[in-house]
Image: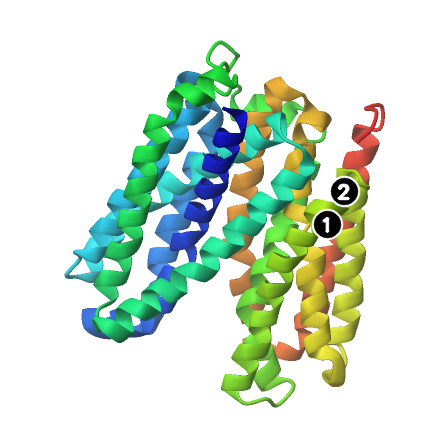
Amino acid sequence: MFSLLLAIIYLSFISLGLPDSLLGSAWPIMYQEFNVPVSYMGIVSVIISLGTIISSLQSDRLTKWIGTAKVTAISVMMTAVALFGFSISTSFYHLLLWAIPYGLGAGSVDAALNNYVALHYESKHMSWLHCMWGVGASIGPYIMGYALTNTYSWNKGYLYISIIQLVLTICLFLSVPIWKKSNGSNQENKKVLSLKEILAIKGTKEVMIMFFCYCALESTTGLWASSYLVLNNGLNAEMAASYASLFYIGITIGRAISGFITMKLNDTQMIKLGQSIILIGLLFILFKQTTVIGLVLVGLGCAPIYPCIIHSTPAFFGSDNSQAIIGVQMASAYVGTCLMPPVFGLVADNISVGLLTWYLLLILMIMIFMHSKLLDVVRNIDDI
């Protein structure tokens, strides 16, 4: 039963990644069809992100109320419905409406699944599960590309993904008894913590800032790498896009490799290793001749950090608090993802895109400092 449940969780992580790249893949056609400025994609993204932040903050309450299994199933169902809504939208305002359940569905399931895995499985599974997220995020654009090529319709791309999510929803509802047998749903009687109570727990602020910095670094690199290669290194757009994709390939491959390394190193050592590799990668990016190598190294360095921070949360804060802490970690992550790439956009517009490496280096230094402070707070905990 436990192995079957793990297989379902792996499928769920692939499912989490599937919709994440769809909007960016389809928007070049969608904005023309809806007759809106290209920049309006940002409005849709912000609504999705706000919904995700809200549901992440409520994940502790929801999980302790109905259990991880039902939170996961209901959240994936909400995402499936929202994707279907996107597929039948005939105006930009319809997208804004469907973006609400889209975001609300994403946050709770992400936090609930991550906490469940952190509590019940070894660190290697956390790395491999996040690798599966990368697989899903890579498959999504291919499905949209297939729809655009063969049906000339972005709507079909969203429809195909919504059907996949609906099938997974059915599987998740059918699997609820398995979760109960594996003790995945006995959190209902635990105390629900308020945001004030969560922030009062020692180490919470440090780990939130760490998560903010990590996701800020990952998203800023992913969004600006191609522009950096064009404007700073003089590459053509096609070559730059191809090279920039190596960053995400580095993350996906790195997480697959990290799963094996975690059998020898603990979470804290994995995080420090990742931070060191990112630092080396950023130094490589400084020189035009080695920028591409640097992007790969930064991707490899990013790979273990996200899953290992999450996996170490029960050890740092206790299993009773881990769901609440992971919820605020996720919220911090989405804030970093939304806020910091546009901030660098202002830097690029008003000063120079060539400052990307120094911007990322500053974020990395704050992350390393906060990790050190976090370890000081919980230094009395053994084997973390």
Three-letter code for the amino acid on which mark 2 is drawn: His
Q: Residue 371 has which mark?
A: 2
Local packing at callout 2 (Cα closer than 10 Å; few below 14, some 14-19, many 20+) is many
Residue 187 relative to residue 262: left or right: left
- Could you say where residue 199 lies in the image, as x and y percent from the top left? 61, 28
Can residue 350 be seen? no
- Would you say the residues marked 2 and 1 are in contact, meaning their CB atoms lie under 8 Å apart? yes
Q: Residue at x 68, y 66 (%)?
A: 359
Could you tell me if residue 44 is visible in this image? yes
Q: Residue furthest top?
A: 189
Q: Residue at x 28, y 75 (%)?
A: 149
Residue of label 1: 367
Task: Pick the residue in front: 140 or 279.
Answer: 140
* Side of 136 where 81 appears, left or right: left
Name the amino acid, label 1.
Met
The residue tagged with tag 2: helix, strand or loop? helix
Gap between marks 2 and 1, in whole Å? 6 Å
